[in-house]
Amino acid sequence: MDKNIRTKAIVIVATILICLYGIIGLPTSKEQLNQNVANSIKLGLDLRGGSQLVLQVQVQDAFKADADQGIERLKDEMLKAGIAYASLDRNDPATIEDADKIHINVKGIPVDKTAPFRELLQLKFANWQMASMGSADYRLTKNTTESLTMRRDTVTRSMRTIENRINGLGLAEATVQQRGNGEANPEILVQMPGVDDPARVKALLQAAAKLEIVEVKDGPFPSEEALRAKSGGILPLGTRPIQQASRPGDQGESWYVANRSAVVTGQDLRNARPSQDQMGKWETSFVLSPDAGKRFGRYTESNVGNKLAVLLDNKARSVATINSKIEESGVITGAPSQQEASDLALVLTSGSLPAGIVYLEERTVGPSLGADSIRDGLMAGAVGVGAVVLVMLIYYKKAGINAVLALVLNAIILIAALAYFGAVLTLPGMAGIILTIGMAVDSNVLIFERIREELRHGKGVLAAVDAGFGKAWWTIVDTHVTTIVSCAFLFIFGTTAVKGFAITLVIGLIANVFTAVFVSRAIFDWELSGKEQPTTLSI
Amino acid sequence: MELFKNTNFDFLGKKWPFIIASLVLTVAGLGSLIIKGGPLYGIDFKGGTVTTVRFQQAPNEDQIRKALAAKISGEIVVQQVTGQNEVIISTDLRDERELNAARAVVFDTLKSTFGSQAGGKEDINLTTQAALADRIRGPLASAGGSLTEPQLQELVKDILAFRNSAPRSGLLGSYESLAGVKNVTPQVINVLKQETVTGPYTIRGFDLVGPKVGKELQTQAFSATLLALLGMLVYVGFRFEFIYGLAAVIAVFHDTIITIGLFSLLDKEVSLTVIAALLTLVGFSMNDTIVVFDRIRENLPQMRREKFDTVVTLSINQTLSRTILTSGLTFLTALALWLFGGQVLNGFSFALVAGIIFGTYSSIFIAAPILIYCREWMEKRRKDGGTPALAVAPGKTKSLK
């Protein structure tokens, strides 16, 4: 055999082996073979069934909370420094885009306090930028870097919390990823194979789960008005009104005056789990971390007789009097069922969300629909590819076999590439593979037609094959590049299904250059190499 | 076998009927788009819910529509899947605030309208593995068929897998059919009969997209298609000449418009996958045009004495065999997808089937005449300006016929 052909044969056989290894591994039994194929070709949610959620982190919530904190600190610092002011508030950005526009308005600083005020800001509020809005008014804004860091942190923390909650549910195969580009993109994609009722997951992910234990100063009152009336309309410094979470059987509301700052918060939790009280009612008990436990112990020891409230998302879940020193554990009562008690335990241990989340999209494919899609896809593939093979064999005879071999290798490379990249096979991806077969044959057709033409012009077989491949080459490059360009724009869409389609098409086309040009040529060379002066070519 | 050997069709002489046909289709499509206020967007682009429901008996579409209309504002489309007792229910979702409740509204309405009335029994066609296991754990134990928890879970999993497999596809008709499932004893069937009911329908899939996302996707789809065309223009302009790029892009644009117009005329929904199909067509139709253009470029130096349109006609004829064969084969695969690919890919494969036809003929009857027209126009301008023509030498015309 010609040395040139031998080299080509080695390259081709090596490619086939590498590809087959990627798809089926090294199986020793039929079961293992099936197992390996299932492992290497990961099916998308639309084929295997499951749920997908797209949620958006309301970043502006974190900005507002941060500004609120800033206002509280500023009030305290100004009080300490003896700087009077007329009003201190913030704006209320409503959308994610507007989050950066957050600002704090400080109004009515006496002229003689201007210098100490500026000094205070420089010293203790360096992350805020100050601008004068007239002689006595100021506006504090966030600079671009600060804003970006804040956006990024908010999204990262939300993702971590969501991951924790998903893992806590025991959804081992579920994935949580940021959608789209940019670290600060607030869209998060949650994929949960096998889950066909995402209602519970949705509620669980959306729970803010901000836990606080605060000192209760006064109460209960039947309404917020009554509460404010008691202290003459203005609440004492450092306190806030809180409402008792309503429970079935409750009559009317109850309100308390509580300390603004919490004794312990959700961040101090070490663990939480569902439990039952003596009456068999479900509740969620939690354990504090050692540090927080000590702090809580000191606090309760010196405040025996005072009241404490357990707040969840700013509502009091329980209010109780401190009877003795409490070291490290507590309970949140009022869960209607075991599932709710354990869900609450889960959201508490997973950490709180720094900002609210809203759902943008939900897609659920039941297992039967996914199975039908696979069957339909395989059927369409068999019919489509069968038709292509049949036509090629009839139209090009022996050369048709050549083209079919190239097509088969093309499909093997494509599937192996998907397996090596860990790409997910979706239904549009399957369509992409089937369509690739139809389009891949174009390269063979271009070359074969060219060879026929050269033969018709009276060229010898070897020269015609040579010219056919040579002249078709640039046409093949041009057609492939244009298709790849149009596929590239499919990536503008964040949707995984469409991306899957584009990826399969692009890989298929790149593999096609190898199979239709290199492999087909090698087969021709091998076919013609035996003869001294080939005079006929079956094409 | 050869279908086209040394063909010599005078395509450009017969271009007018085709150009007129193209214009009619384009105008009809655009007219339909204008009258209907844009394409009929699927929920990917406008927001809404899509629920796929399979029934035991042929469903009453009107009843579904009426039941939902009482609960949901906006348009409700109930579409029957041909050949199956299956419907696809689409509802609008115009307000971001309805998003959280949308799922429950559709599911609850279905349940109250069609759900089984057998009091308190678990509907085996709507249940989940956990719920079914919880339901039969006790009764199964008291019936004497004590199973360990993993055994029970395995049993329930097998029962539901049987329910989900074809031809049941999610709907169990009778308990007797379960007899072949592993570990399903008559005792298990009795417990199932006693605790559950084979409900009249099952929900096979549910999609929900918020209106805000839809709006964004609309813009993205529009810009992706335009940018793809622009990318082609740049590449073909770079590899050939600008007028080649222009002619090719106009031809491809023509295909896109006609395909979208056809969707509008036939009241088919434009979904995300349809846009994917359109962008694939942009690439495919471009391929076809480029093969012809490549041949024109190759022929030009050897045919300096011929008129430009003679060269074009010859090039089209030389590549005709390839054009027909490739388009035919791609068409076959697209057709297979359309006929056998199932409901989910219907719009996608329809766009491909229609687009391949237009893409093929536009390379011959749209791209080539535009190229010739542009070329002649440029020649004329050059002559008027007094500069000699470069590529095509004026001379005696020789017809190919």
Image (cartoon, rainbow, N blue to C red):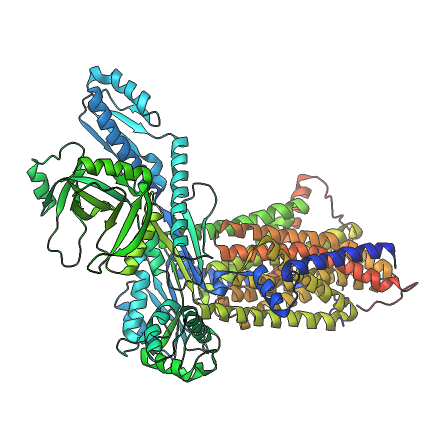
Instruction: Give percent across and percent down for residue A237.
Output: 16, 31
Taking the image as shown, residue B13 lies to the left or right of residue A494, namely right
Q: Please identify the quadrant where the C terminus of chain B is shown.
A: bottom right
Q: For residue B132, which quarter of the picture?
A: bottom left
Instruction: Give percent across and percent down for residue A248.
Output: 17, 58
* Residue lying farthest to the right in this orientation: A532
Residue B9 seen in the current view: no
Q: Is residue A293 above or below residue A197?
A: above
Q: Nearer the viewer, residue A45 or A168?
A: A168
Instruction: Give percent across and percent down for residue A211.
Output: 27, 45
Q: Nearer the viewer, residue A245 or A443?
A: A245
Residue B342 seen in the current view: yes
Taking the image as shown, residue A371 lies to the left or right of residue A222, namely right
Q: For residue A28, which quarter of the picture?
A: bottom right
Q: Which residue is at 32% across, 21% downward?
A: A123
Q: Which residue is at 92% across, 63% downward?
A: A533
Q: Please identify the quadrant where the N terminus of chain B is shown.
A: bottom right
Q: Which residue is at 40% across, 39% downward?
A: A153
Instruction: Give percent across and percent down for residue A300.
Output: 20, 38
Taking the image as shown, residue B151 lies to the left or right of residue A229, namely right
